[in-house]
Image (cartoon, helix red, strand yellow):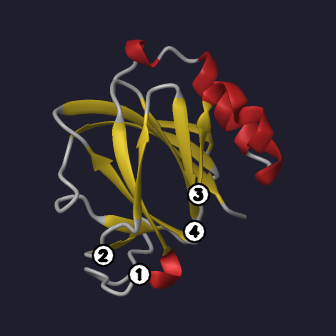
Amino acid sequence: MILDALENSALYESLNPRFKAAFDYVKKTDFSKLEPGKIYLDEKNLFINFAEGKGKTKEEAKMETHRDYIDIQIPYTQDEIMGYKPAKDLKNPIDPYNEEKDITKYTDQGDSYVTVKPGQFAIFFPEDGHQPGIGEGPFRKIIVKVKVK
């Protein structure tokens, strides 16, 4: 897991060949003019879910992992708390891995929690369990999905 400010995104572009295009798009786009939905930058290799949600408690928010995609999670309208736990330590899946949605959800809770503010991002790799969406009230966020290979 990585937590940093969008202004420092160039420090992480070497970690995946698609990171630069993802960060460039996010930094130049005025999301206030967009409706929630998917934005495909490189077909299924790189896309954005511009999402609306309602904040959850730690108990309501589900831990999740992905096999095929890296998540870059960017709060847009308000702070969001995100839980973290190494995927190898997750023991209680709710359902088996969903290949179509590339997700496994768990009842496990995070070992640690971070507050991610608008203008910051959190990167979660397949080995990172993450528990997004903790907060209050309605919010919008940017979720960049980056194909691992």
The quadrant the N terminus occupies is: bottom right
Q: Which residue is mark 3?
A: 1
Q: Which residue is mark 4?
A: 126
Disc 1 from disc 2: Cα separation: 6 Å
Label 1 residue SS: loop
Judge whether 20 appears above or below 114 on screen.
above
Is the residue under label 2 in contact with that under label 1 (CB below 8 Å)?
yes
- Identify the residue at image location x=50%, y=14%: 30
62 relative position to 38: left or right:
left
Which residue type carries mark 2? Asp
Q: Could you tell which of marks 1 and 2 lies nearer the N-terminus?
A: 1
Instruction: Pinpoint residue 19: horizontal percent, then vertical percent.
Output: 71, 43
Label 4 residue SS: loop
Q: Mark 1, mark 4: which one is toward the viewer?
A: 1
Label 2 residue SS: loop
96 relative position to 142: left or right:
left
